[in-house]
Image (cartoon, rainbow, N blue to C red):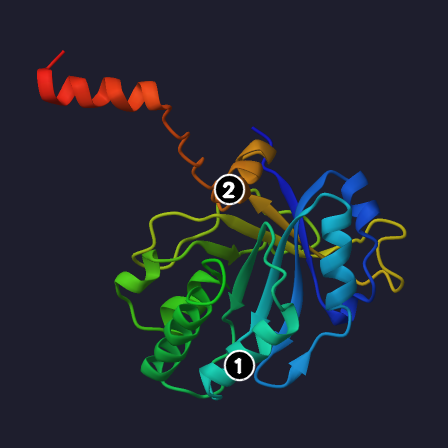
């Protein structure tokens, strides 16, 4: 099985040409939307639209500052993305400790996840096993959300074969960021900054299924009974025929 290919980008990459990514068989991507309570990535609108226009499944992510109030950070994130959750998911990027305690970091992360979940599709967590085990408290919360985990080889320009190591108590993973110094394909970005490469825990059909499962299909409206059908139903109830 070939694990589906994805990339993620931020302001440092410049404007990403998602048609080139699509031509390289990229089937999912992520764009940074915001940091903390005030920063908004200037390339997010372009990246967000570009993924959709090229048929690439979309994630938007927020870099969490555990030292800052979670609600103002979430509001910033939601304000940047707006209501554009059509076949898309939010991601909380947890990789900064800022000198905060394990309990404070855990509370900030969990509160942020719940706040987003109450207002948007269920978010994912992006992090690394070592960071999660070092800076957060263990508990059942670790299996409430899907995981996007980073783990690289010593040469970070080459893809780690996977799977990534799991934080303590976590039973599965969804996405593996397996290289972060990958040489960008020609024309992908204006400054050819090294690229983050991601692999799905499954093939492209699994990606389609994951995103498709978020679309709730409305139940069809009942077809009104004719007079004859109503009479028949009544006779069945009264006479048992």
Tell me where residue 54 appears, x and y as whole percent.
77, 45
Q: Determine which of the numbered discs, if any, sits on residue 170 in the image.
A: none
C-alpha gap between disc 2 and disc 1? 27 Å
Q: Quadrant of residue 167?
A: bottom left
Q: Residues within 10 Å of mark 2 (few under 14, many from 20)?
A: some
Q: Quadrant of residue 135?
A: bottom left
Residue 146 relative to residue 60: left or right: left
Q: Is residue 241 above or below residue 225?
A: above
Residue 194 visible? The answer is no
Tell me where residue 203 appears, x and y as whole percent.
57, 34
Name the residue: 51% across, 72% down.
95
Residue 17 visible? The answer is yes
Instruction: Name the N-terminal-most of marks 2 and 1.
Output: 1
Quadrant of the frame with the N terminus: top right
Asked whether 57 or 136 is in front, the reply is 57
Q: Residues within 10 Å of mark 1 (few under 14, many from 20)?
A: many
Name the residue: 59% across, 79% down.
76
Asked if disc 2 and disc 1 are in contact, CB closer than 8 Å, the reply is: no
Residue tagged 2: 210
Q: Is residue 148 above or below residue 74?
A: above
Residue tagged 1: 73
Tell me where residue 239 appears, x and y as whole percent.
9, 16
């Amino acid at each position: 099985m070939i694990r589906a290919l994805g990339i993620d980008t931020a302001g440092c990459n410049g404007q990403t040409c998602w048609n080139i990514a699509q031509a390289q068989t990229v089937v999912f991507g992520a764009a940074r939307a915001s940091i903390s309570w005030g920063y908004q990535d200037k390339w997010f609108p372009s990246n967000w639209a570009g993924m959709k226009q090229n048929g690439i499944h979309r994630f938007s992510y927020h870099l969490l500052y555990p030292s800052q109030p979670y609600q103002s950070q979430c509001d910033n994130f939601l304000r940047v993305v707006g209501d554009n959750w059509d076949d898309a998911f939010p991601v909380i990027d947890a990789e900064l400790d800022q000198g905060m305690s394990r309990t404070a970091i855990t509370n900030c992360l969990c509160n942020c996840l719940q706040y987003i979940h109450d207002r948007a599709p269920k978010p994912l967590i992006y992090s690394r096993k070592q960071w999660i085990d070092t800076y957060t408290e263990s508990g059942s919360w670790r299996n409430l959300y899907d995981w996007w985990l980073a783990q690289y080889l010593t040469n970070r320009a080459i893809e780690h074969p996977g799977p990534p190591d799991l934080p303590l108590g976590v039973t599965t993973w969804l996405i593996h960021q397996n290289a972060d110094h990958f040489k960008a394909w020609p024309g992908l970005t204006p400054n050819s900054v090294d690229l983050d490469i991601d692999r799905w825990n499954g093939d492209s059909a699994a990606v389609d299924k994951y995103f498709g499962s978020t679309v709730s299909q409305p139940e069809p409206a009942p077809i009104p009974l004719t007079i004859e059908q109503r009479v028949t139903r009544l006779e069945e109830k009264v006479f048992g025929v």
